[in-house]
Amino acid sequence: MDYEHNQYRALGIRASYLAACALHGMTPEDDGENLEQLFQFCRFHSMTAIVAMALESVPTLGEKLQPWKQEKDRAIRKNILLNAERERILNHLEQIGCWYMPLKGSLLQFDYPKFGMRQMSDNDIFFDESKSTEVHKFMLASGYEAVTYQIGNHDEYIRKPLYNMEMHRRLFQNGLDPVLAGYYRNVFERMQKDSGNQYGYHLSREDFYVYLVAHAYKHWRSGGIGIRSLLDVYIYVSKYREEMDWDYIQDELEKIQAASFEEECRILSRSLFSEPVLNPSYSEREWKALDVYFGSGAFGTEENAVNSKLERERTSGKNGKLRYLLNRMFPPVSYLQENYPGLEQQKWKVPFVYLDRLVKAIFCYPKRIFRELKLLKR
């Protein structure tokens, strides 16, 4: 194993140990060495707040913790502002008679022992696609910029300096994840009505967990996921294990081909966070899996994305690199239809869309292409 892997492994174990200390209210053993490296690693994994909460209990660290405290305070402030903004948006959805369901971190944050432990970069809201035009007008009137609209499975809105809202018309893209998209095509049938409003919905404990795993699995198969995703799994399972129907969960995970992935996540998350351990012992297979999580960060890496796609092409047949390149240049028509509004009704435009993509890639994103080709060659 090279130096970089050794370094990431040491930082990953240290960050996980400190996060476990914060979860269990224990003062960690930490001498404060190489805090800058640890700080950057935790930023990479969106875990600075929870690790800061552990380090703050070490009395000898003093001024060394100033950047950590500032980062923790910023993370808590951001969560407060995002929560208030989400409620404002949901109130508008109530006013226009639009059903909705908050997703992922906006709900998971409240399952952590302390507010602010679970950092958020954005908020995700699943809503009635027939109301997307009205929602779009409201978001623009609220000062948001539409990063994407009617493209893919969600509309993304940002309002600087910190608001990022993803309004999901569908939970997964058929062109990218046909199995997951197919499973969640009729997800409304699984949704349960909230009791405190007119148009809000939620998933059962079991279905929320299956979706949590499905979303992580999607990212794991592309750019990878980091240890915050393992932390989410640990938090949810440890809190709701006894009240969940695990036979049902297993059956549903089999349907989306994520059962073995979930098992690995659950086992690794328990070993990392069920108690603080400074020098854990793992099998070679477990270390190999953890190295991937430690090196992926909260949102995955471009290298992981290339390697994952290439591996899938290789398992599909010979000439993996050629198949990879052809798929990047000429993705499935189903993918194009989800990303180019109106294409489904005007299929004659498909060849021109392929040409447009190719020209834009060459002239607008040459550095990205060069980077991807370099990773592919490696």
Image: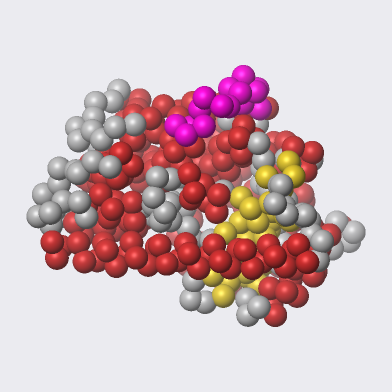
Q: Which of 39 and 238 is in front in this view?
A: 238
148 w.r.t. 58: above or below? below
User: Which residue occupies the extreme right position in the image?
Assistant: 345
272 w.r.t. 246: above or below? below
The residue drawn where x is 24% and y is 66% is 67
The residue drawn where x is 71% and y is 47% is 194
Say which quarter of the image contains residue 227: top left
370 w.r.t. 137: above or below? above
The part of the chain drawn in magenta is 237-252
In this rendering, position of residue 58 left or right of residue 147: left
User: Which residue occupies the extreme top position in the image?
Assistant: 247
Q: Is residue 244 magenta?
A: yes
Q: Which of 37 and 236 is in front in this view?
A: 236
Position in image of residue 262 (x %, y %):
52, 30
Position in image of residue 273 (x %, y %):
34, 35
The residue drawn where x is 29% and y is 32% is 275
User: Which residue occupies the extreme front position in the image?
Assistant: 196
Say which quarter of the image contains residue 265: top left
Q: Could one spot residue 357 in this view of the protein?
A: no
Quadrant of the drawing holding the N terminus: top left
The residue drawn where x is 70% and y is 65% is 91
Q: How many labels does the image show?
A: 0
In this rendering, position of residue 231 left or right of residue 209: left
Q: Nearer the viewer, residue 240 or 300?
A: 240
Position in image of residue 356 (x %, y %):
71, 67
Q: Could one spot residue 104 in this view of the protein?
A: yes
Say which quarter of the image contains residue 286: top left
Q: Is residue 223 magenta?
A: no
